[in-house]
Image: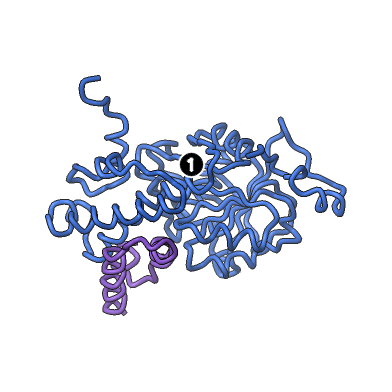
Amino acid sequence: MPTARINASALRPSALASTPTCPAFGSEMLRHAVLGPGGIGALVAATLARAGREVVLLVRPPSLRSYPGRIQIESVVLGSFAVDVDAESQLSREVEVLWVTPKAIMLDAAVGLAPPEQVRRAAVVPLMNGIDHVARLRGRYELVVAGAIRVESERGPDWRVHQKTPFIRVELGPGGEEIAGELRAAGIECTVRDDEAEVLWQKLAFLAPVALTTSALGEPVGAVRNDPRWRARLEGAQAEVVAVACAEGVAIDEDALRSLHGNGARGDAELDAERRRRRPPAGA
Amino acid sequence: MQKDVAAGHQPELDAIAGPILRGGARHGVDVLMTRELVALVQQRVAAAR
């Protein structure tokens, strides 16, 4: 797959011809907008703003009225800091990156704040759960770079963000190199993969079995693991998502995935996964 | 998602389970457990209203 620049001019000669002014960047810092800034989006926005990037939040008028003008972060990875971040209820400035971070059920309402004619050839980067939003965004915007984030982060109505996992890890699909550089400069770990389906399905294969079993049981993942019947459901759901991903052309190591959920009583799946990942293999 | 269900919020159920259910149907892959879990979550959502 060819490496796409963010402005994708190589991929979109017709768009280039009809719009002669391209946003200039390279060694320049990129300008960012964040659509649907909840626990993930506010974390990304504040972190980029702290690193000196121009950032604007896109929030609906009721939220805009109660927005205090700054985001407070309490993060295991990034520390505690507060940073002023602009906000508006409709994208009115030129940006190179549009992060899309609402809950999936809010996506249709959220995209109204970022009209395609204003977004133009900015890279649209969703960090959302699921798969289907990528195609929906492609139906609206010129350039979409698939993404996924592994983190637990929550934002309160007071715009304080609590980020609890000892990692913040972003994966981006093809075309994400320059954006990955922005994240890394701000202190967020980021990997770019050649295969966008892999970015999305790896995350879903990890997330879906845990989300479904904990939601069906009404208890955290520790309770799922500790009950043999629920554990069997977790593993059954895992086998299914692995099989579907495989049919979609994405190979997921089922044993590795199972071992991710293998132990740990704390009830924090991502945290347990991280502990596993960092533990040297037996006999090594 | 569990916190959303517990709080009576609409969960991201279709975003998370939809690709598995639809992908299963498309490729002839058995996704009975996912289907069962989705039904249980839906019951919980309905009960929380």
The image quarter in which residue A273 lies: top left
In the depicted view, which residue is nearer to us: A69 or A45? A45
Q: How is the image coloured?
A: by chain
**Which quadrant of the figure contains the C terminus of chain A?**
top left
- Left or right of residue A112, residue A195 in this image: left
* Residue A217 in picture, x, y percent from top left: 21, 64
* Residue A275 in picture, x, y percent from top left: 28, 35
The image quarter in which residue A3 lies: top right
Count of labels in the image = 1
Q: Hue of chain B?
A: purple
For badge 1, the amino acid type reads Val
The image quarter in which residue A174 lies: top right
Which chain does blue denote in the image?
A
Host chain of mark 1: A
* Residue A88 in picture, x, y percent from top left: 65, 60
Q: Residue at x 41, y 36 (%)?
A: A77
Which element carries disc 1, helix, strand or loop? strand
Q: Residue at x 26, y 79 (%)?
A: B47
- Left or right of residue A230, residue A187 in this image: right
Crowding at label 1, few (<14), some or many (≥20) Cα neighbours within 10 Å? many
**Which quadrant of the figure contains the N terminus of chain A?**
top right
- Left or right of residue A22, residue A256 in this image: left
In the depicted view, which residue is nearer to us: A8 or A269? A8
Q: Residue furthest top?
A: A284
* Residue A73 in picture, x, y percent from top left: 45, 45
Residue underneath mark 1: A170
Name above or below for residue B40 compared with residue A193: below
Name above or below for residue A117 compared with residue A191: below
Name above or below for residue A169 compared with residue A143: above
